[in-house]
């Protein structure tokens, strides 16, 4: 049986340097890059789709809202609105797609005011980034629901 010793060559050193550089860049990108941030008031709207009529009354103005997956305080309800739910329907006669109302179902628009850590690249509430299109789970005293963030506004700008 032959006893071979492994030797480092120039290519091995380059690979090790590349891996270390990639790890350092990743750490900088996710932890240091955030730059200067400040605590700001943020207003965002969550759309809860296809709920029964009257469910919007379960969301009282001024109520405290928790994010129910990670269990942290999200903010306070500033406004609640509702509109008829719609879905895309294809008309085979005219070969067109149009939106039709879903009977007895309504979309609830819940506007929430929150304190967030804001910088040039992110809006963070606790450890969760707020982005338009993010799915968020809400709960509070007497209500619960989930929906997508459809609008975000940084107050005081």
Image: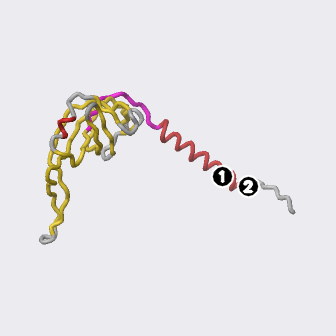
Residue closest to the far left? 93
Q: Nearer the viewer, residue 23 or 140?
A: 140
From the image, tell me which residue sits under label 2: 9
Location of the N terminus by quadrant is: bottom right
Above or below, 150 against 11 in this view is above
Side of 44 where 103 appears, left or right: left
Residue 14, label in figure: 1
Which of the colour schemes (rainbow, by chain, secondary structure, one colour) is used? secondary structure
Element class at badge 1 = helix
Specify the segment rendered in magenta: 33-44
Location of the C terminus by quadrant is: top left
Q: Determine if the magenta segment contains residue 148.
A: no
x%, y% of residue 150? 26, 44
Above or below, 62 against 152 in this view is above
x%, y% of residue 107? 19, 46
The picture quadrant where one finds residue 77 is top left
């Amino acid at each position: 049986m032959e006893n071979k010793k492994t030797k480092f060559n120039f290519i091995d050193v380059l690979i090790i340097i590349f891996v270390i550089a990639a790890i350092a860049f990743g750490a900088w990108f996710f932890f240091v890059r955030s730059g200067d941030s400040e605590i700001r008031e943020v207003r965002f709207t969550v759309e809860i789709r296809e709920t029964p009529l009257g469910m919007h009354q379960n969301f009282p103005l001024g109520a405290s809202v928790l994010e129910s997956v990670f269990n942290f305080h999200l903010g306070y309800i500033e406004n609640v609105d509702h509109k008829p739910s719609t879905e895309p329907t294809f008309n085979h006669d005219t070969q067109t797609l149009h939106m039709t109302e879903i009977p007895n179902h309504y979309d609830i628009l819940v506007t929430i005011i929150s304190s967030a850590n804001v910088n040039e690249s992110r809006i963070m509430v606790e450890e969760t980034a707020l982005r338009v299109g993010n799915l968020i789970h809400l709960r509070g005293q007497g209500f619960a629901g989930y929906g997508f963030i459809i609008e975000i506004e940084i107050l005081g700008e």
